[in-house]
């Protein structure tokens, strides 16, 4: 039984009221003596001890053998949650996020974002450079060039979002093994095309990736084409 099925069963088999309309909610809390209508017409309420109302400080604590001895289970705000239910919740949340991402991003963008290639740093690169975009994302590329002015190794690192990771990863795949002249021909439109497109709010990620690459290329100095 899924978490949503469990929740539906709980709501169906109890006196829990889920998302009542305003008038029905007021009537229910007055009938249950959990609130009253004041002389000025406002609804005055409190949280009686038997109420299901919870505090903003409440924390669902997963009760696992390796950590349960370190938690004060007598504290009112520490609410135990069995590992199976927690894992089920996480799985359903991840699936929901995945479905939403598939509605927004192409398969290639999601692939590069979840399985980026050439992510990290080169030891003693021939050049290293990048920029921070208006969105706050930074991309840095490390380059190594052989005697024929071919990019033999390239790696990137970023603090950016998934779309930024996808763009930077694809840049390294497109540029590795190319001459410096060929590398400079890469533009954001071509990068987007290879990725299967980007939403309008992520198009700047492709621009940032190409501009960061060009900064790294500019720092090659004597390796650059004349």
Image (cartoon, rainbow, N blue to C red):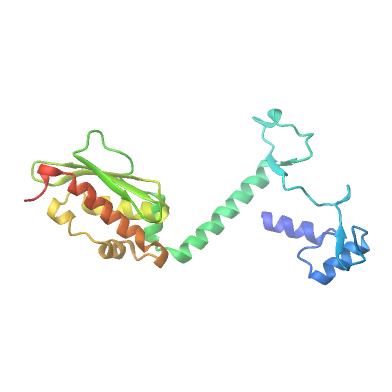
Q: Quadrant of residue 206?
A: bottom left
- Residue 166's image quarter? bottom left
Q: Residue at x 69, y 28 (%)?
A: 70
**What percent of the width, then of the height, locates residue 94?**
55, 53
Q: Position of residue 77 (x, y in %)?
A: 75, 41
- Note whether residue 112 is visible: no
On screen, residue 30 versus residue 165, left or right, reads right
Q: Position of residue 200 (x, y in %)?
A: 40, 67
The answer to which of 134 and 93 lies nearer the viewer is 134
Q: Nearer the viewer, residue 94 or 22?
A: 22
Residue at left offset 42%, top offset 63%: 105
Quadrant of the rendering where the N terminus is positioned = bottom right
Task: Determine if residue 74 is in view.
Answer: yes
Decide: is 71 above or below 181. Answer: above
Farthest-out residue, left: 226
* Residue at 53% from the left image edge and 57% from the top image edge: 97
Q: Which of the 4 image quarters holds residue 111?
A: bottom left
Residue 9: x and y in percent read 77, 58
Q: Residue at x 66, y 44 (%)?
A: 84
State whether residue 189 is above or below residue 211: below
Q: Left or right: 118 with respect to 4?
A: left
């Amino acid at each position: 039984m899924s978490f949503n099925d469990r929740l539906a069963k709980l709501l169906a088999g109890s006196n829990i009221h889920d998302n009542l309309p305003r008038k029905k909610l007021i009537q229910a809390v007055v009938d249950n003596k959990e609130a009253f209508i004041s002389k000025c017409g406002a609804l005055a309420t409190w949280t009686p001890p038997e109420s299901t109302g919870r505090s903003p400080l409440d924390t669902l604590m997963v009760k696992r053998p390796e950590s349960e001895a370190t938690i004060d289970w007598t504290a009112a705000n520490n609410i135990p949650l069995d590992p199976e239910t927690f894992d089920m919740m996480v799985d359903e949340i991840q699936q929901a996020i995945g479905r939403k991402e598939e509605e927004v991003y192409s398969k290639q963008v999601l692939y590069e974002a979840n399985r980026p290639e050439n992510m990290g740093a080169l030891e003693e690169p021939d050049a290293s450079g990048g920029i921070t975009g208006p969105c706050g994302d930074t991309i840095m590329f490390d380059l190594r060039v052989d005697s024929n002015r071919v990019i033999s190794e390239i790696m990137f690192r970023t603090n950016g979002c998934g779309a930024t990771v996808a763009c930077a990863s694809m840049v390294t795949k497109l540029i590795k093994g190319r001459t410096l002249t060929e590398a400079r021909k890469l533009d954001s439109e071509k990068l987007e095309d290879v990725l299967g497109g980007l939403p309008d709010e992520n198009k700047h990620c492709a621009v940032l990736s190409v501009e960061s690459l060009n900064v790294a290329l500019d720092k090659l100095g004597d390796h650059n084409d004349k």
